[in-house]
Amino acid sequence: MRYEELTIEGRNAVLEAYRAGKTIDKLFVLDGCQDGPVRTIVREAKKHATIVNFVAKERLDQISETGKHQGVIAYAAAYEYAEVEDLLKLAEEKGEPPFLILLDGIEDPHNLGAIIRTANLAGAHGVIIPKRRAVGLTATVAKTSAGALNYTPVAKVTNLTATMEDLKKKGMWFVCADMGGELMYRLNLKGPIGLVVGNEGEGVGKLVKEHCDMVASIPMKGDIDSLNASVAAGVLAYEIVRQRLS
């Protein structure tokens, strides 16, 4: 397994980390802050024997990576990357056909965090990201995921297309988002499926697209020609959800 150390910032993110059983090594709390959510976090910290430091706002601003700490910053045990097999095992344990989200070069941590959040809510069994030219599990990703990172496994792979080939041998199909594709409502997105979403500027790379079995387009009626990567992922993920429920 591989690890990536980070801080956890924000009240909801820290509280969700405790609820998920994550080990918090140190907790920094704004001195004098006694509202309900903060009291709950401090109570959890004491329950888990976490070292609690009450500090001035200037100190929190200094150690914050996101600039939006809400008076609470935790130093946690590192997030653990899953293996691809772990994602498939999770689907098997739930008795569901695998539903994975693969990201081709997402570089914006806010987009990655939002996609992990969507993956969790849409019932995806995990997210796969490449090692190179992509953001990892940073503090901003953790905060933007609103706690979903504690529940949705993320695998990091050396070669996205090689991973897709391995998964195809296990019966998975792949659909990617692209303006030139078939209208998503006309595609059969049921069964074991991997949703591939490209980066913020160039979309899905040519080689990755060639390894997809289907290319889906999202109907757009506005004056601009593309959606934010995390929004596109959400729209397509919920079309998969809709088809699974029908």
Image (tube, rainbow, N blue to C red):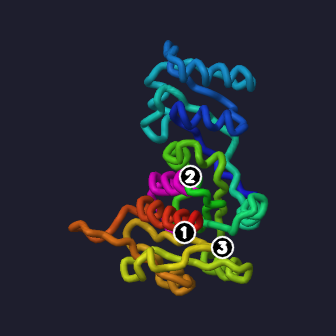
Left or right: 92 as drawn, with respect to 232: right
- Above or below: residue 18 compared with residue 235: above
Q: For the residue labelled by badge 2, is the local secondary structure a helix, a strand or a loop?
A: helix
Left or right: 75 as drawn, with respect to 214: right
Name the spot of residue 81 as percent of width and height, x first.
69, 56
Check residue 121 in the rendering and tell me which mark sits there, or answer none: 2
Whether residue 139 is visible to the viewer of this picture, yes or no, is no
- Above or below: residue 161 compared with residue 85: below
> For the residue marked with disc 3, what is the amino acid?
Pro
Query: Foreground mark, 2 or 1?
Result: 1
User: 58 or 14: which is nearer to us?
Assistant: 14
> For the residue marked with disc 1, what is the amino acid?
Gln
Give the mark nearest the N terminus, 2 or 1.
2
Magenta-span inclusion, residue 176: no
User: 139 or 20: which is nearer to us?
Assistant: 20
Residue corresponding to mark 3: 192
Q: For the residue labelled by badge 1, is the local secondary structure a helix, a strand or a loop?
A: helix
- Above or below: residue 236 compared with residue 27: below
Residue at the spot 55% in from the left edge and 70% down from the top edge: 195
> For the residue marked with disc 2, what is the amino acid?
Leu
Residue at the spot 53% in from the left edge and 36% down from the top edge: 9
Magenta-span inclusion, residue 105: yes
Name the spot of residue 71 as percent of width and height, x first.
49, 26
Disc 2 to disc 1, C-alpha distance: 16 Å
Residue corresponding to mark 1: 243
Name the spot of residue 122 as percent of width and height, x first.
56, 57
The part of the chain drawn in magenta is 102-119
Tag 2 near tag 3, CB within 8 Å = no
Say which quadrant the C terminus sits in: bottom right
Give the mark nearest the N terminus, 2 or 3.
2
Give the mark nearest the N terminus, 3 or 1.
3
Say which quadrant the N terminus sits in: bottom right
